[in-house]
Amino acid sequence: MQVNDFLNVELLGNRFFAVKGFTEALHRDTKKLVGYRINISIQDESSDFFMEMFSASWPFSVKISTTTPSISVEDMKNNKTREVILKDLQVGQFNGKLWFTASDILPVGTK
């Protein structure tokens, strides 16, 4: 069995809550905005990772790879938590650290 066998987004479940606020994700060299990072709480009781938190204080925030997310930066400033859909969620590892990325963050009720 390989480490990558555990890097399966289905293990995380499908019920996520975004926690207040985005932080900017900048290109390492150009410092231009390439997306946002958001803290996510896993709230799927069937997940082995139920109640785990992907947050900026850990290396587990989720990078949203768009500069115009469907849930706006302003919307997230005004909400403490919000149930969300992480479109095209992916998980991987590099140099022993996990990374999480999604193409967009959507309000529940959209696909």
Image (tube, rainbow, N blue to C red):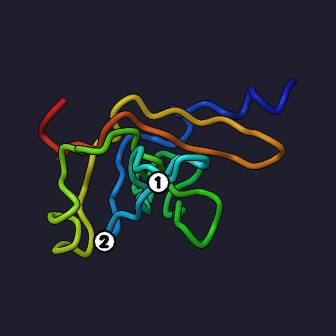
Q: Secondary structure at mark 1?
A: strand
- The amino acid type found where label 1 is placed reads Ala
What residue did someone put label 1 on?
Answer: 25
Q: Secondary structure at mark 2?
A: strand
Q: Is residue 88 above or below residue 66?
A: above
Identified at 31% across, 38% down, the residue is: 104
Pick the quarter of the image with the C terminus.
top left
Identified at 71% across, 34% down, the residue is: 6
Identified at 59% across, 73% down, the residue is: 57
On residue 107, the disc is: none
Count of numbered circles on the image: 2
Identified at 45% across, 41% down, the residue is: 13
Q: Is residue 99 above or below residue 79?
A: above
Q: Is residue 88 left or right of residue 99?
A: left
Pick the quarter of the image with the N terminus.
top right
Front-most of 14 and 20? 20
Front-most of 18 and 1? 18
Q: Is residue 107 left or right of residue 96?
A: left
Front-most of 30 and 84? 30
